[in-house]
Image: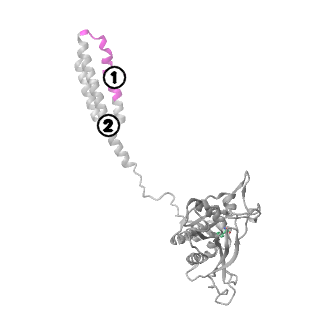
Amino acid sequence: MLERIEAIRAEAAGAIEGAGSSAELEELRVRYLGRKAELTGVLRGIAELPQEERGQVGGAANRARKELEALLEQRAEALDATELEAQLVTDRIDVTLPGAPPRPVGHPHLIARTTRLIEDTMVGLGYHVAEGPEIEHDYYNFTALNHPPGHPARMLQDTFYVQSHPDVLLRTHTSPMQVRSMEAKPPPIFVVVPGKVYRRDSDATHSPMFHQVEGLAIAAGLTLADLQGTLLAMCRALFGGDRELRLRPHFFPFTEPSVEVDVSCFQCGGRGELAGGERCNLCKGQGWIEILGAGMVDPNVLGFVEPHGYDPEQVQGFAFGIGVERVAMLRHGVPDLRRFFDNDVRMLEQFS
Ligand code: PHE
């Protein structure tokens, strides 16, 4: 019996050493140590052996089983490692291969690019960029901006209100961020605010959603001349280095005085007529193009943020709001503002 056990052990050990895969190894485990294996049968039959043989046979069979178990484990580890290695080689992914099918690289929308251009210009002048909520409180959009009750902009036909909350609306301009910015930081403050605004308007030059960039500068001693110089720098960056500005008196509830700003026409150079003598179609013969609204921040507005450090006797400043679509249309000769939002790639691809 002892010889038989030794013969099984030797045969099994050899087979395990020679196993070439984990599957083969598993077969050997079943063959030599499984329920129907000869060695298992020997171990199960020990109790029936004569008393004097039990100790020796039992010991030898148990040792053989333990040894084979250990060998199986070793071999399994070795095989696992080589199999993993092989798999890693064959499963290699080439991350440098282009995706299938390769997609053309996109580019920012013209509105995003124009916004960025305005931001970059103002950052160059020392301004910070901030963004604010498009869903706004009546307080920030109107009240704190000195819009008296009954102001037309407050009316239903001009503004989108949230039905269940009569004091909540889609902001009609980026100016609410003047107030929010001043609440957030004491003077001096120099900030530009790009963003979407909403009005009940729709035609070739108006869309219910459009983009503005707001500018706000508050510090001790700022004057209308500072506003003029700042806007001149901005307009020259947008429309060419030899542009001139013209300020016309206007009205906004939150600036005093208020101005509308025209830039000299960059198609006819401000002459109103083209080289051949015909009327300039861009400025309609005027020589000037209306480009934005601005003004000195009304002390009443500062009054709303006085607890945040804005004493109208100590600081003053200016604000402006410029329409991004209008700038983009002028710079690129886009005839209809609605084309920006039609998502027609033939149109969008022209501005890559
Ligand atoms: N918020 C004004 C508008 O949308 C523009 C503006 C901004 C005017 C800042 C003056 C100062 O028409």
Residue sitting nearer the eye, 72 or 16: 72
Q: Is residue 134 left or right of residue 90?
A: right
Snapshot colouring = one colour
Q: Residue at x 67, y 75 (%)?
A: 259
Q: Residue at x 28, y 31 (%)?
A: 71
Residue contact at pointers 1 and 2, CB within 8 angstroms: no
C-alpha span from label 1 to label 2:
23 Å
Question: Tag on residue 69?
Answer: none
Q: Which residue is mark 1?
A: 37
Secondary structure found at label 2: helix
Q: Is residue 332 left or right of residue 207?
A: left
Whole-percent x and y of residue 92?
A: 39, 51
Tell me the quarter of the picture where residue 41 sits: top left
Q: Which residues are magenta?
A: 29-51
Say whether residue 174 is visible. no
Looking at the picture, which amino acid does disc 1 mark? Ala
Say whether residue 66 is visible. yes
Secondary structure found at label 1: loop
Looking at the picture, which amino acid does disc 2 mark? Glu
Is the residue 173 above or below the residue 32 in the image? below
Q: Main secondary structure of the magenta part?
A: helix
Residue sitting nearer the eye, 238 or 127: 127
Q: Which residue is mark 2?
A: 77
Tell me the quarter of the picture where residue 198 sits: bottom right
**Which is in the foreground here, disc 1 or disc 2?**
2
Assign ligand 1 to one image quadrant.
Answer: bottom right
Whole-percent x and y of residue 295?
A: 64, 72
Which quadrant would the C terminus be assigned to in this image?
bottom right
Tell me the quarter of the picture where residue 203 sits: bottom right
Q: Residue at x 33, y 25 (%)?
A: 33
